[in-house]
Image (spheres, rainbow, N blue to C red):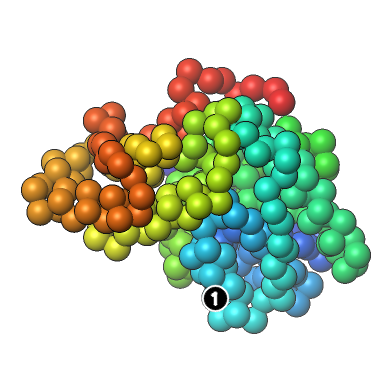
Amino acid sequence: MINPEKYDMLLQWLGRMENAAIAFSGGVDSTFLLATAQKILGKKVIAFTVKTPYIPDWEVEEAIAFCRERSINHRIIQAGILPAIANNPENRCYLCKKHIFAVLKEEAQKDGYTSLLDGTNYDDTGIYRPGLAALKELGISSPLLENGITKAEVRHFSAELGLPTADKPSYACLLTRLPYEYTVKNDELRRIEKAERFLASIGFAASRVRNHSNIARIEIEKERLTELLQPETAARVVSKLHKLGYEFVTIDMEGFRSGSFDRNKKQAPT
């Protein structure tokens, strides 16, 4: 159920700020937060987008385009793969966020911004999100979470604001496509990105290519499985993924589900 009063609460929350730096991925939540912050704070807002090997290039490009179109002050922060997450440990999200947001917080303070905000929404507290602990430790504010704004409400308000992300599928970093305790390789990350972009180009935007070395395990919306398995479509997908370097191409019959490598995990400490 959509509560329109929450948007007004968010406006009031942001209105109490002197200025704000926004951790901006270009996704649904951070785009809504950035657009709303700009509405209230105008030129007193800056967006920081982190570019790493495990963030798809196209998402960074969309973030750049959004800020350019709206004349939002925007900076790209380059980051490599931390040695601590080179083997994709179970607490990689915590380790990554702790490092990245510490860097962003320092950059924001250097530029005179008193607060660094992120787009965590209220629904994120009910699923496996070890990175939330890192945000709390660093004192990062999450205004959508603090005002009880759910993902459905983010999409609803985004549509009312005419944001291009209102119906954008949710994405996560490419490390989520790898099993835990799996060596992270740049060429495999690029292969995943290209495979998923191909699937999006033929109409399967809400998809994941889970990477198991030479095996691609494709997750799409369960109700669309038969569509993907049509002979002509399946042949195109298999051909493309073979060319990208996968020896075997499989379909996950359980369909798409966020965080499928987190099966049976609870919201856990670091």
Q: Is residue 29 visible?
A: no
* Residue 53, position as x, y percentages in the image: 59, 55
> What residue is shown with label 1?
65
Left or right for 108, reference 267? right
Query: How packed is label 1: few (under 14 Cα within 10 Å), some, or many (20 or more)?
Result: few
Closer to the camera, 133 or 238? Answer: 238
Residue depicted at 45% across the width and 68% down the height: 164
Q: Which x, y percent locates residue 71?
A: 64, 81
**Total number of numbered discs in the rendering:** 1
Position of 27 relative to 188 (above/below): below
Residue nearer the viewer, 243 or 133: 243
Residue at the limit of the structure toward the left, as seen here: 231
Quadrant of image for the C terminus: top right
The residue located at (64%, 22%) in the rendering is 268
Amino acid type assigned to the residue bearing label 1 in the image:
Ala
**Residue 43 seen in the figure:** yes
Give above or below for 91 relative to 226: above
Residue at 49% across / 31% down in the picture? Answer: 179
78 above or below 175? below
What is the secondary structure assignment of the residue under circle 1? helix
Indicate the position of residue 262 as horizontal and vertical percent values.
Answer: 50, 26
Q: Quadrant of the N terminus?
A: top left
In percent of width and height, residue 46 lies at 74, 69
Q: Is residue 147 left or right of residue 16?
A: left
Q: Nearer the viewer, residue 247 or 119?
A: 247
Based on the displayed image, in which of its 4 quarters is residue 33 positioned?
bottom right
Q: Residue at x 14, y 43 (%)?
A: 229
